[in-house]
Amino acid sequence: MQRYSLLSLLRHGLNRHTTWAPAWRSPPLRERYDVIVIGAGGHGLATAYYLTKEHGITDIAVLESGWLGGGNIARNTVTIRSNYMRDASIPFYVKSVALYEQMTRELNFNTMHSRRGMIDVIQTWGMMRDRRRRQHIMDLHGSTYEQITTAELRRRIPALTGGGAEARLPILGGFIHPEAAVNRHDAVAWAYARAIDAMGGEIHQQTPVTQLMRGPDGRIAGVVTPRGVIRAPKVAVAVSGHTTTLTETAGLRLPLRTMNLTAFVSEPVQPLIDVIVNCPDAGFYLSQSDKGELVIGGAPDPGQSFRRDIKQTVFEDTVSAMLSLFPAFKGLKMLRQWGGHLDIAHDASPIQDETDVPGLFVTAGWWGGYKAIPAGGLTLAHLVATGRPHPLMAPFSIKRFRHLDYVMESGTTTAR
Amino acid sequence: MMLIPCPFCGPRTESEFAYGGPVRPPRPDPATTAEADWVGWLTEVPNPLGPVEERWCHLRGCGSWLTLWRDTRTHAIVGGPQDAE
């Protein structure tokens, strides 16, 4: 792997940038691998990376139906945080935030990690009690929430001019989660792809898996793609919203529903907001990108959905919620909207386990899975390589449903 | 924007309705049902690329409940399997 540095930039710059090597190869597709990872999104790429780095497995194919970095890793709001509710969840997300913080150095690729903190704007006493409860649980597990006054909240977010004494829901106070960060989603996909390629793994774009194949003994045997049958004794499914579409082809049923979660961005404006602002009572969250655009998200569509665009009703609800707290944004023009279909488990916590089909692994239910990418890959690689769940992921086995031992999670979506 | 056919008010805009969840099969008797089937009934819903059957409530209207089939790929309200006969 050619390392990126100031020196390499100078050297290739003198050659008018004609001498850069491709960041990853496009090798011919073989008929057999040790491990197939379905989905070259964040979780699939991170899994392949840690399979090689931590467990020395190099005979890996990552199969991607579209193009690298074109799935949900490009369809989120790049919010990295660990302010969850459950004892089982918080240590996992603390680990994930820590892995994100070292990613630029570890992968020699600038992921533009910006630890800017997230501020929750609290407008009801019920939400205040929820955040205080979370603060105490997070204290136990190495994550941080700090309560701030309304005056401090307005000092840190000068654009927040709504929610005064005359408002329907006056602001009661705020909570700041200092570890929260944003980064560059494309860089995460490209950095992992480059590292996987350098260590010998293969990434095959434009290779959709249409069916999972089981052998006569019931074990997973491989996958069917339009480019032919590919065999492997271990297959990991990391395809977000289409998890059940794929696992049903192997006769599996999973407690997952697919939902559409949407976001939109405004035109670029001058630097205005230097934290991630989350307004759970109003029902929206926003941050400002390095380009100056405001990245705004709200609630999911009602009902299951495989559509990847925003509904007019959802858009209007989110915008009116935003204007109740940021009335000055009335003049902003909106540039783009997008949706991502993601699966949510019955208890809103992820599922990562070997399924009833031996050799077939799923990582699913990652509602807001962007923040979980590095740790989700680390734990799935551990499970695939050793056959035992990683301690951070042990509570999220699929067997929990058999004992009705749910991990009901309320920290999953930001705007809630 | 979906136009949802309310049985009482006729077609009305989606923003007047509340989503009531997917339609499930009738509740089995847990005492006589195998454990796997019981947990399946509690936690699993059909998740197809295509029509799903679901409940909606005309909450900001007359309050009627209704059942419809909606295509998860397009959000179009479609005929259910029983209508095809």
Image: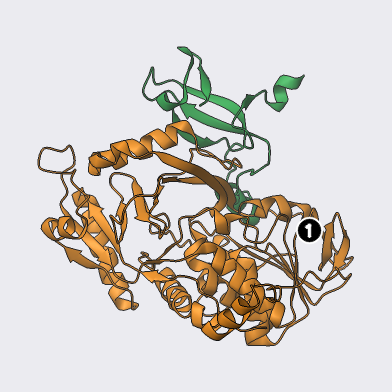
Q: Amino acid at mark 1?
A: Thr
Q: Nearer the viewer, residue A199 or A261?
A: A199
Q: Which chain is orange?
A: A
Q: Is residue A46 visible?
A: no
Asked if A354 appears above or below B6 in the picture, the reply is: below
Residue at image point 38% right, 54% down? A292
Q: Nearer the viewer, residue A265 or A240?
A: A265
Q: Nearer the viewer, residue A10 or B27?
A: A10
Q: Which residue is mark 1?
A: A207
Report x, y in % for residue A66.
71, 54
Outermost top residue: B9
Report x, y in % for residue B15.
42, 27
- Crowd around label 1: few <14 · some 14–19 · many ≥20 (10 Å): many
**What element does badge 1 sit on?**
loop
Numbered circles on residues, count: 1
Asked if A265 appears above or below A106 in the picture, the reply is: above
Residue at image point 60% right, 42% down? B28
Asked if A111 appears above or below B32 in the picture, the reply is: below
Image quadrant of residue A42? bottom right
